[in-house]
Image (cartoon, grey):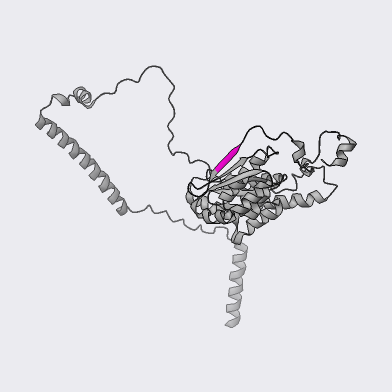
Amino acid sequence: MSDSEQENGPKKTGPVDNAWSLKIPEFKPEHNPNRLLEESSFATLFPKYREHYLNEHWPLVQKALEEHAIKAELDLVEGSMTVKTTRKTWDPYIIIKARDMIKLLCRSVPFEQAVRVLQDDIGADIIKISSFVGNREKFVKRRQRLIGPKGCTLKSIELLTNCYVLVQGQTVSALGPYKGLQQVRRIVEDTMKNIHPIYNIKALMIKRELAKDPKLKNENWERFLPKFNSKNISKRKQPKNKKEKKPYTPFPPPQQESKIDKMIASGEYFLKEEQRRAKKKKEQEARHQEAEKKRQERRAQAFVPPEEKPEEKKGQRNDINLEEFKMKVKKGLKKRGAKS
């Protein structure tokens, strides 16, 4: 808050139509003369391939954090970075900003972009995308879809949201204004859920154009936005033969008969071994005879002549006109008489 605003007195507070347009007042050292009571610290590990880059840029990191009275330490043996508050630190939230900064540096975000998170109107978000897809091949395809050919999809997301976005391994690091971070998270999550990012990009472009029109400022924009109906979501395959659940009964099912019980019931148990073999052989011969009979019937079907349809006799014409017939005969007789 500026000195002129303080002199005029506090402004009235109330509901705001567009909270994103509000400017965050700067938090100065004179606003917290007593400083912080407790020391806070955060540490994070970094991968081996980032060691050379961090070692080169660490003096710049320390210089940027010293402006906010934050101490930074780099341990190359353990592979960790630590940020701590000091007695001179006046902003209680700057340690959270410093923690986000070292996290972004771990995720391969360049120092020039990561240092922006120390600003009041800039935030950071690290989105884990590994848990959305179980299949490795699908995960790689959808992650590549988010980047686009030659990175054009990622670039368009950055232009529409005013955020810096970096896809690295199983995470997506975003850095920018808080409203833009919400939009980036939504696009990333929808993409990993098999919704193409072009739908969200198109919606953001339409919203940007609608915001310029004062007539549509207070209207609902749903009718202008593209709607996505997923056709790829396949329903769970149902089994061909469903087993119907039997009604629940507290009593156990009756005990099934064993093989010996069935043999006793049929009387086979009391037969001798030779009699059992003879009976088994007799049943087998009966099955063979029945199968042979069916086989002969199936073969004989090829020699059965098809049924011939009776020929339909053409009906004779009975409707003869006698007068016309007499006239024809008379004409024929007259022609013969004239020739003779």
Magenta region, residue range:
36-43
The image shows residue 182, relative to residue 156, as above or below, that is: above
Considering every residue shown, the one lying at the far front of the view is: 87
The image shows residue 215, relative to residue 56, as above or below, that is: above
Q: Is residue 42 magenta?
A: yes
Residue at the image position 17 percent from the left and 24 percent from the top: 267
Q: Is residue 224 magenta?
A: no
Considering every residue shown, the one lying at the far top of the view is: 251
Q: Is residue 113 visible from the viewing direction of this image?
A: yes
Tell me the quarter of the image containing the N terminus: top right
Considering every residue shown, the one lying at the far right of the view is: 8
Percent coordinates x, y for residue 260 in the rendering:
20, 25
Task: Characterize the magenta stretch by its predominant secondary structure.
Answer: loop
Which of the pair 229/202 is nearer the observer?
202
Percent coordinates x, y for residue 45 in the rendering:
52, 45
Q: Is residue 27 visible from the viewing direction of this image?
A: no
